[in-house]
Each structure stands twice: as C-alpha cells, then as structure tokens.
C-alpha cells in the first residue's frame, strides 16, 4: 500500500471538487481494505464514486469460461516430474527452448523465488537476465528487476503470483508453472501473461505426484497439447 500512500500525499491535495468533472481512481490492485483508509476516502469525499469490481472468479459459483482459459493463440501443455527433481527438469526445458525467448517461471512461495534464481544461475543461465519478483521486494527493487527483464529478449523472470496480474510486461513467449497453481482462476491469470493481444504464447505446467490434488482441478478445464508440438 506504499504507492497509494505516496499518491494520496502528493496528488490528492492538488485535487479540488468540480461540478464539471469527476475524479476517479483506477487500479488493478485496489481492494476494499485499501478503500477504508482515510486518505483514500478523501478522494471520494463528494460521492462514493470509487468501488471495487469483484474478480469474476470471486463471484459465488462462477468459474472462468473455457474461452477465457483457452484464448486463441495460447497453447497449454504439461509434463510429469518426479518429486524433488523439478529444478533439473526446468533447466533442461529452458536449455531446449530456442532463443531469443522471454520466460516467466511461476512458483507458489515467496521463499522459492530467490532459491530458483540462484539455481538457474548455477545451471548456467547467468548470461541471461535472470531476476526474481515477489511481494516482499521494495518497489525500487521490483522496478529494477522488471526493467532488466524487459530489456533482455531472452530474460527469465522467476515470480510469485504477484506477477500474475496487473503488470505491464513485454511479449512473453513462455509461462512455466514450476509449481501447480492452486486454483483454475489463478492458472488463468498466470498463463495469461503469455499470448497477449493476439500474439502466440505457451503455458507449461510441471506436475509432481504431491500436486495431484490441484492438478485434478486444472486438467479437465484446459485444452492440453503434447509438449513436443510446442517446442
């Protein structure tokens, strides 16, 4: 919420009520909790013009449609991995992909981001921009890492789900789910980082036996293709 505090401190005092216009706050990460903050409430001091649009997946009983999960141009695949050997499999896949190739690797825990970045550099990918992104980074660090990723057409971004939505990322050729997404909507957001704006994209899930519970949620909803056809 730090950037909201900065915005409120610098921007809102400059705004004055006007009968000829509206003041609106739009954000992909604005939540009802943040709207409760007094400095944000002052932005809507005339009327309650700011509101939070619920995510589609949060509407009771409603899941993303097959068209949303399987947009044209985005191809989905998966491979089975032995528990404890995913890192080796990931390195082999990255080495097999043609370059230039910009890739996001999603993990399920903040702690896993730095660990995977270090491993990828040890595996010999250090000549590429291999950077991490998670919610515990300071805003300055996030921007630096994203700038490095954007500047390298073969960049590798290892990220928690903070990167699944709300970021302006360049053409991403592959999204690789090192850890299976816990829900179908989360998978949808992750995979949607690739294949945007009509471009071709690829989403690959690495599945280990201990992730069968979550994998069973995803499997029937996705139009899967053999991995060989994507490489």
Image (tube, rainbow, N blue to C red):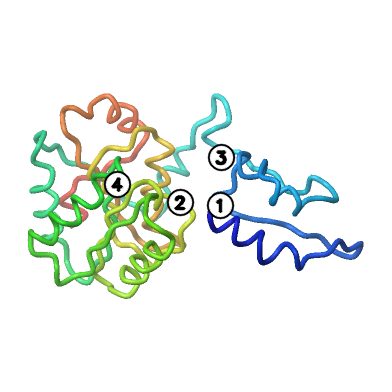
Residue 165 percent location from the top left of the image: 46, 51
Give yes or no for contact between labels 2 and 1 (Cβ–Cβ under 8 Å).
Answer: yes
The circle drawn on residue 76 is 4
Tell which tag, 4 or 2, sits nearer the viewer.
2
Whole-angstrom CA distance, mark 3 to mark 2, is 12 Å
Of mark 3 and mark 2, the one earlier in the sequence is: 3
Which residue is drawn at the image coordinates 65% and 43% (left, top)?
52
Crowd around label 3: few <14 · some 14–19 · many ≥20 (10 Å):
few
Which residue is drawn at the image coordinates 38% and 33% (left, top)?
183
The kind of secondary structure element at disc 4 is: strand
Look at the image and tell me in which quarter the C terminus lies.
bottom left
Of mark 4 and mark 2, the one earlier in the sequence is: 4
214 up-or-down from 163: above or below:
above
Q: Name the residue under label 2.
A: 165
Give yes or no for contact between labels 4 and 2 (Cβ–Cβ under 8 Å).
Answer: no
Q: Mark 3 points at which residue?
A: 55
Which residue is more in the foreground, 182 or 48? 48
Residue 138 percent location from the top left of the image: 40, 58
Residue 196 percent location from the top left of the image: 43, 59
């Amino acid at each position: 919420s730090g950037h909201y505090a900065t915005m409120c401190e610098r921007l809102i005092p400059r705004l004055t009520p006007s009968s000829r216009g509206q003041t609106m706050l739009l954000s992909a990460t604005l939540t009802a909790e943040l709207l409760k903050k007094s400095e944000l409430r002052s932005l809507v001091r005339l009327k309650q013009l700011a509101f939070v649009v619920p995510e589609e997946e949060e509407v009771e009983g409603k899941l993303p449609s097959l068209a949303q999960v399987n947009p044209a141009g985005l191809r989905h695949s998966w491979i089975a991995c032995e528990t404890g050997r995913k890192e080796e499999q990931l390195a082999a896949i990255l080495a097999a992909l043609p370059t230039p190739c910009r890739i996001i690797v999603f993990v399920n825990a903040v702690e896993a981001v730095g660990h995977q970045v270090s491993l990828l550099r040890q595996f010999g990918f250090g000549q590429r921009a291999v950077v991490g992104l998670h919610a515990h980074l300071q805003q300055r660090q996030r921007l630096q890492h994203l700038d490095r990723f954007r500047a390298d057409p073969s960049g590798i971004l290892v990220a928690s789900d903070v990167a699944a939505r709300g970021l302006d990322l360049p053409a991403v050729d592959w999204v690789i789910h090192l850890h299976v997404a816990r829900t179908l909507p989360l998978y949808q957001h992750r995979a949607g980082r690739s294949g945007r704006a009509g471009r071709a994209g690829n989403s690959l899930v690495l599945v280990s036996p201990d992730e069968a519970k979550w994998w069973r949620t995803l499997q029937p909803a996705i139009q899967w293709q053999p991995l060989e056809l994507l490489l």
